[in-house]
Image (cartoon, rainbow, N blue to C red):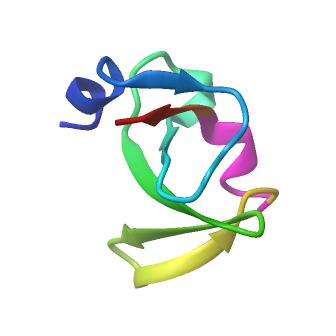
């Protein structure tokens, strides 16, 4: 599902509120996780371990997995 959404929309260089952020393990080309950018270098997402939560864009876990953003 995430990879289907990733191929649509306009590629984003500068994040704006509402942009979809995509993440993949080890910089793989197909995303396995999606989040919504909410501004102030934060995004909201859902995980199996924590449910819905907020994270910073420079989070040490998520930052290396970030592969790009799209505006739908």
Image coords of residue 12 (percent x, y): 60, 29
**Left-right relation of 23 to 5:** right
Q: Is residue 23 above or below residue 6?
A: below
At x 62%, y 50%, the residue is: 16
Image coords of residue 47 (percent x, y): 38, 70
In the picture, the quarter occupied by the N terminus is top left
Image coords of residue 40 (percent x, y): 77, 69
Numbered marks: total? 0
Q: In this view, does 63 lie above or below 38?
A: above
In the picture, the quarter occupied by the C terminus is top left
Q: Looking at the rendering, which quadrant does residue 56 occupy?
A: bottom right
At x 46%, y 59%, the residue is: 36
Q: Looking at the rendering, which quadrant does residue 43 occupy?
A: bottom right
Q: What stretch is highlighted in magenta?
A: 59-66
Viewer-side residue, 52 vs 12: 12
Q: Looking at the rendering, which quadrant does residue 3 occupy?
A: top left
Viewer-side residue, 16 vs 48: 16
Q: In this view, does 56 lie above or below 67?
A: below
**Left-right relation of 16 to 46:** right
Q: Is residue 58 above or below residue 31?
A: below
At x 32%, y 72%, the residue is: 48
Image coords of residue 70 (percent x, y): 47, 32
Would residue 28 be counted in the magenta stretch? Answer: no
**Left-right relation of 23 to 16:** left
**Left-right relation of 54 to 47:** right
Would residue 62 be counted in the magenta stretch? Answer: yes
At x 29%, y 21%, the residue is: 8
């Amino acid at each position: 599902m995430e990879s289907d959404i990733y191929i649509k929309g306009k590629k984003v260089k500068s994040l704006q509120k509402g942009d979809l952020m995509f993440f993949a393990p080890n910089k793989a080309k197909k995303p396995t996780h999606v989040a919504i950018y909410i501004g102030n270098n934060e995004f909201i997402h859902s995980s199996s371990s924590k449910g819905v939560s907020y994270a910073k864009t420079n989070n040490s876990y998520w930052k290396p997995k970030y592969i790009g953003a799209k505006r739908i």
